Image (cartoon, rainbow, N blue to C red):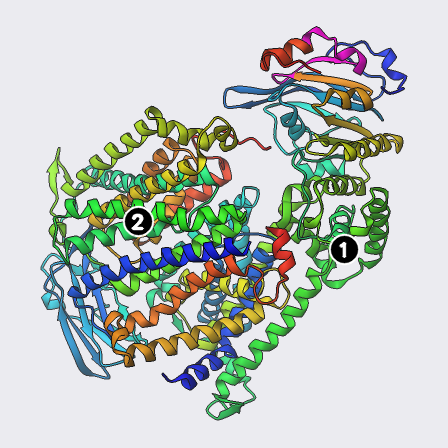
Amino acid sequence: MDLIAALGSGLSAAIGPVAAAYAISALGLNLQFGYTGLLNFGHVAFMLMGAYGTAMTVEAGGSLWLGIVVGILAAVGLGLVLGLPTLRQRAEYLAITTIAAAEVLRLVVRSSWATEVTGGVFGLQGFADEFFALNPFTSSATYDLGPIAVTGRRLWVVVVGWTLVVVLTLVMRKVIQSPWGRLLRAIREDEDTARSVGKNVFARKLQALTLGGALGALAGALLAIEQQNVNPDSFRPEITFILYVVVILGGAGTIWGPVIGAITFQFLFFFVDTLMRDTQANVAWVGAVISAAGAAQVRFVLVGLGLVALLIFRPQGLLGSRKEAVVGA
Amino acid sequence: MRDATWVDDVAAAPGNSKPDPILVVDGIQRFFGGLRAVDVEHLEVQRNSITSLIGPNGAGKTTLFNVLTGFDRPDSGSWHLNGGPLVGLPAYQVARRGMIRTFQLTRAMPRLTVAENVMLAATNNPGESLIRALVGGWSRHERAAAERAEQLLDRFGILHMRDEYAGTLSGGQRKLLELARALMVDPELIMLDEPMAGINPALSQELLQHIVGLQQDGKSVVFIEHDMDVVQEISDWVVVLAEGKVIAEDRPEGIAGNREVIDAYLGVHHGEAAS
Amino acid sequence: MRTRIGSVLGKTVFGLLALLTVTLAAAVAASAQGEEPGESIGGTLFQRIDGERVPVEGVVIVVSQDGTEIGSATSDAEGTWLVQLPGPGSYSVRLDESTLPEDVGLTDPDRTELPDINVTSGQDRQVIFQLGESALEQPGTFTRVAALFVVGLKLGAIIALCAIGLSLIFAVTGLVNFAHAELVTLGAVIAYLLHAAGPHWPLVAAAVPAVIAGAFLGWGQEKVLWKPLRRRRMGLLSMMVVSIGVGFALRFLILIFYGGRPRAYPDFAGQAATPILGIPVVPKQLVTIGVAVAVLGAVGLFLQKTQAGTALRAVRDDSALAESSGIDAQRVIALTWAMGGALAAMGGVFFGLTESVQWDMGFQLLLLMFAAVILGGIGTTYGTMAGAFIVGVAVEMSVLFVPSELKTAVGLVLLIIVLIFRPQGLLAVRERIS
């Protein structure tokens, strides 16, 4: 087994642009799920809004920066549409509506009916030139970052992405440590009690949902820019559940949990993937049981099992306090 | 038995008016499917009194509480607090108008500290706006709230627990925390849903003292209670609910011998007397 | 505490191993299907005639890279085709129009060639050629409406079968089981493996073990997972996330061992419609509706007339009261899981029969199940059944007004409208708050 190759692939993914985008998106999901207790099972829909808002605006002749704003506003709109009818109901209504909306939105975007504007199954490409025009690094050159080497193009996305992650996390820390943040946590613990002492719970839940959605949209835009490509099948429901693993792995309801979670998750995801492919190809009995295509899906099975195992055995994740997890049970 | 003087002027009949009512209820009905859970024609609660709400299981006491505090909507009816209408207001608006409730199953927010549990209830908190949370300017209010929360925790004897998670409190301590949190809002009328349930006798005396203390602070208290000894001991006035209707109102010493009340309890629980 | 965690771990591991064994056995059977490793491009050619998938056979598809032909394939009786690729990369896929049947055309005539199809490592890339009935004679409006109504009833019947368990499990445990979808898929897949591969049983015979397996999987997950978690007082919020994880793991296990290709039950693929009262109806649709209605009736009788059914209703209405009157709530819950699993698996077989058997078919149906459950009132039995038929008919008949690709969206719109105007559902009363 080629452990070095697997470690390298994991490490490269852990600091990559996708990890940064996951961290930003998970920051939003953590605000919703970790702090406010909202079960948003369709977070990927907000990312889709950000990505398509960006790409479609550029396609229609707008600038990339305007596109990002449009994408974020579209996500806020989606948050309102999904939140207004559900946030007065019990928690599962939001969960059901969001999981449904995310899948429907993807179907709409990929339908031939919408192909004119969304590109249908082919998506939209090449809309992020404005971003790469600002690249201070040489796009085609290779830069050494310790054990791994990256192109200048990738390095530019990485620098911007992780800068955003740090800035947004610091902003998040500020609002979470305010009375606003305390009220969100109170809603997570017992919204009836918050209501009984005069707090407008519905308005705060709507704020958490839309703000978290906006962060998801920003992450979606970042992903789209990095790939210079949006495609409906990049926004399958799997992404939402990967983000749940990221949030819970890092520690739901902790400030730096989403960031640590995203880095750890991406490392493990690619480490396992490389290892699995290698094993499939070189260990005879494994190759007999599982196909190469199957080996590539094993990591998704582990995502599901990981989610279950985390919630059972380490609900506080890497950064949460054991004591808090115990009293909360 | 209390020493309120106003009760001498009020005759013991359902729906009678009180000299200085803080809460007035008119024609509230609430149906579940075909079942009429609450059907209160008229009810007044005297200001600065301790009023007990009693009645057999399923009489609609908690449902009435839910309706009055905005946690449930009635099918018809209206009610006023200090003359202001509360119909159609969401629960948080009712609370802001000065009527605070507690729940039958005590609700501590386990993963908030004891101090946070109380400070949460601070009113007009500028830091609860998202914009202000971001730009600041709420720390003075927060300091004042922390000070007040400390006083309340001290009053209820749980100040030493202030930095612990509320989830680590004992059942009795949670009751005290709930009262402290309710008082943080500085309400005029406090609605307690079975505050004595599941409390050991030693603590229940302490809790009763605190409830009397609320009255001494000038607040009005309505509470649901099953134990007739408790009702006799601290209430000024007793309202009896059965099958959703107010079937009797009286001074505590008069209620135990009330024929209607005995019938209501016997009618539901065969062979189980009212006291 | 330690021993309890240990036993939860032990049971979970045992359960997963059992599940893996079942799936592996199924995979060995499936390997007769010739699932080949490496990258490929494939798809299924079909046209929709009144909501029914009709495979298109004998069409030649050519895959090339940088102008060089890599390989070609001809669609089989199920309309499926597959071209193996030398590796990941960008390919172009062309449909040879001259091989299309005379009455079939591409909905978009310019799309005979799809350039720049990117295939990643290990991917079984699916591409779609939209075939239309443009050249077919359009049936009259009335017959079309009537035929769509029948298709809608069929979908409603399937949703009802699958959603009853979802609703009842919620009613007795408070858990919305997001892994319910995978019970549907497993039912369809197990029946497929016994019918089309391995022993080649008739579908009716193959459906029996599928339904039994569904009951076992429902009952088993309650025993090894949900009951221990309730014992540990895990919050419902966390339990719902756990169910998401379980569903996710199962879905990809199925993908690994069954593959990504949609398949039809061979004995019933492309069954022709026969006119009944002038309405073109496919017999398998009628069978689906008939059997489902009979089973739903039996479920209703079970709940009303039997002791177990009465116990279930008692636990649903007030589990503390039920337990104090001597009902073993834990047994009732286990029974509900078994019943829900069996019904979901049966629904899956019918869904596979009238659509196709696919690794994420249950997940696709889940949205409509949710719409039905919310519409009827979550936790109700008859409400869920009524909601299912309303959703099924509304979704299928919506193709009169919206493109058929978007008909699932109609389910979501219904769901949101109900949440706005009658969140407790059509047949439920506003709940009590305690």
Near mark 2 (Cα within 10 A), the count class, few <14, some 14-19 or many ≥20, is many
Q: Position of residue B107 (x, y in %)?
A: 67, 41
Which quarter of the picture shows residue A108? bottom left
Residue C428 in view: no
Q: Position of residue A77 (x, y in %)?
A: 54, 55
Residue A170 horizontal side relative to residue C178, left or right: right
Q: Label 1, secondary structure: give it.
A: loop
**Chain identifier of the residue bearing label 1 in the image:** B
Near mark 1 (Cα within 10 A), the count class, few <14, some 14-19 or many ≥20, is few
Q: Are marks 2 and 1 on the same chain?
A: no
Give the vertical position of C68 relative to C146 (above or below): below
Residue B133 horizontal side relative to residue A13, left or right: right
The residue where tag 2 is placed is C184
- Identify the residue shown where x is 23% and y is 32%: C294
Which quarter of the picture shows residue C97? bottom left
The residue where tag 1 is placed is B163
Name the amino acid, label 2.
Val
Give the vertical position of B119 relative to C252 (above or below): above
Name the amino acid, label 1.
Asp
Image quadrant occupied by the N terminus of chain A: bottom left
Residues rendered magenta in the picture: B242-260
Pick whichever, A175 or A145, lies toward us: A145
Q: Position of residue B197 (x, y in %)?
A: 69, 31
Residue B255 horizontal side relative to residue C144, left or right: right
